[in-house]
């Protein structure tokens, strides 16, 4: 069977779905937050490695949230990223107050309880190759302060060439206007955490601009696009190890890479490569392809060193890197990008991303 199901919680309310291909690669996803829990693949030596962080069970995951919440593997929504100001967002001709998750009126990753904490309905779409499973959640009107009832489906597939395909489809079920901008928050350590950080991972990006942030809110985007050339954000000119740039950032604020790279200014384009990262020690390479205009590369700058995950792995700052493809963050407050994230009756929100694994040797 290309898709199998097993219990992920003790009470049986949360399940885990295992997608596999003929080469033995296995992708695990739970219906809690439509969340990737494992990605197991053979490295260049032929050794199986689980290259994403997470926890063994739903109960362990819940316990971990009391320590820290890095959103490991989760589907983020309704709206990914930071929204500022969050207390006067205009949607459906009214001012909406979104929950403040970070200081000074910043709403992050969908609010206090975003899609990453919801139980999704599940449909096994294909037991053949490629194995695929669809997760669906209906967000009621007013959830986390956002008007309109929105349905989001997230289709995961694992192909024979070791690629995880994700397709989002969203629609406004009820209301005159809403907001939607989901992403996937899987982190990757291509050594399977045999190297505890991604310092030695090599990265290149297909983005020569990034979005500026406010001086008094260093993580909140202004909408202004600036060139990456002659900055620590330049992964376009030539591939670079993360270790070459991480120490250039202030350890009290940013700590590392958590930047919005602009792959395009169009809401949706044909799917194309936006990032590539590899480990010379494991031989594994990850290529990210997307049809979205923005790529947020986050190097796990704030992952708590008190988190102990699968196989007893102790996570820490820079333990893994996430590539979040999406529309521009804070777009609802940026006039030139606002239309990217608004959803109206009869419209279908679409987003495709591929995380493809192969070997460099």
Image (cartoon, rainbow, N blue to C red):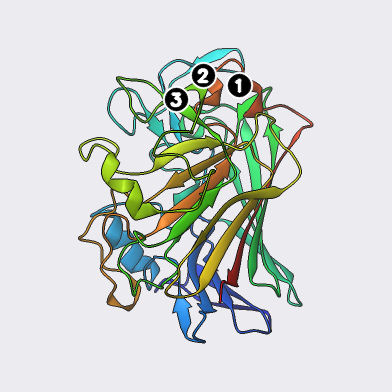
| Residue neighbourhood size for the residue with mark 3, other residues' Cα within 10 Å, grouped as few (<14), some (14–19), many (≥20) | some
Find numbered disc 3 in the image and state the secondary structure of the residue it sits on. strand
Residue at 49% of width from left, 28% of height from top?
211
Find numbered disc 2 in the image and state the secondary structure of the residue it sits on. helix
Instruction: Classify the position of the C terminus by image quarter.
Output: bottom right
Which callout, 3 or 2, points to the residue nearer the camera? 3
Q: Is residue 321 left or right of residue 124?
A: left
Instruction: Classify the position of the N terminus by image quarter.
Output: bottom right
Q: Which residue is mark 2?
A: 333
Q: In the image, which disc is placed on residue 212?
A: 3
Q: Earlier in the sequence, mark 1 or mark 2?
A: 2
Image location (x, y in percent) of residue 349: 70, 38
Mark 1–mark 2 Cα distance, whole angstroms, equals 7 Å
Q: Earlier in the sequence, mark 1 or mark 3?
A: 3
Q: Nearer the viewer, residue 20 or 12?
A: 20
| Residue neighbourhood size for the residue with mark 1, other residues' Cα within 10 Å, grouped as few (<14), some (14–19), many (≥20) | some
Q: Residue furthest right?
A: 346
Image location (x, y in percent) of residue 109: 44, 39
* Image quarter of residue 356: bottom right
Q: Which residue is mark 1?
A: 338
Asked if marks 1 and 2 touch (Cβ < 8 Å), the reply is yes
């Amino acid at each position: 069977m290309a898709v199998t199901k097993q219990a992920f919680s003790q009470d049986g309310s949360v399940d885990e779905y295992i997608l596999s291909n003929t080469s033995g690669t296995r992708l695990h996803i739970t219906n809690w937050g439509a969340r990737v829990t494992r990605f197991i693949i053979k490295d260049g030596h032929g050794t199986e490695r689980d290259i994403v962080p997470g926890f063994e069970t739903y109960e362990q995951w819940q316990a971990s949230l009391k320590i820290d919440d890095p959103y490991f593997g989760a589907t983020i929504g309704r709206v990914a990223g930071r929204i500022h100001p969050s207390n006067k967002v205009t949607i459906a001709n009214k001012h909406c107050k979104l929950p403040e998750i970070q200081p000074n009126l910043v709403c992050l990753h969908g609010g206090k309880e975003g899609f990453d904490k919801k139980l999704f309905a599940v449909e096994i779409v294909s037991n053949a190759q490629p194995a695929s499973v669809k997760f669906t959640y209906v967000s009621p009107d007013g959830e986390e302060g956002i008007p309109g009832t929105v349905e989001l489906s997230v289709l995961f597939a694992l192909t024979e060439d070791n690629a995880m395909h994700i397709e989002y489809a969203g629609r406004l079920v009820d209301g005159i206007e809403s907001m939607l901008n989901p992403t996937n928050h899987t982190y990757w350590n291509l050594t399977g955490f045999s190297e505890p950080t991604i310092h030695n991972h090599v990265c290149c990006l297909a983005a020569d601009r990034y979005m500026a942030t406010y001086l008094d809110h260093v993580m909140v985007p202004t909408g202004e696009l600036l060139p990456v050339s002659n900055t620590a954000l330049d992964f376009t000119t030539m591939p670079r190890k993360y270790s070459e740039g991480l120490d250039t950032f202030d350890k009290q604020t940013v700590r590392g890479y958590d930047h919005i790279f602009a792959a395009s200014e169009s809401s949706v384009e044909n799917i194309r490569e936006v990032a590539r990262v590899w480990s010379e020690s494991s031989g594994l390479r990850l290529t990210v392809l997307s049809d979205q205009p923005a790529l947020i590369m986050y190097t796990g700058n704030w992952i708590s060193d008190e988190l102990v995950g699968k196989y007893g792995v102790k996570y820490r700052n820079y333990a893994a890197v996430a590539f979040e493809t999406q529309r521009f963050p804070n777009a609802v407050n940026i006039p030139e990008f606002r239309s990217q994230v608004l959803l109206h009756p009869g419209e279908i929100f679409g987003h495709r991303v591929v995380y493809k694994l192969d070997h460099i040797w």
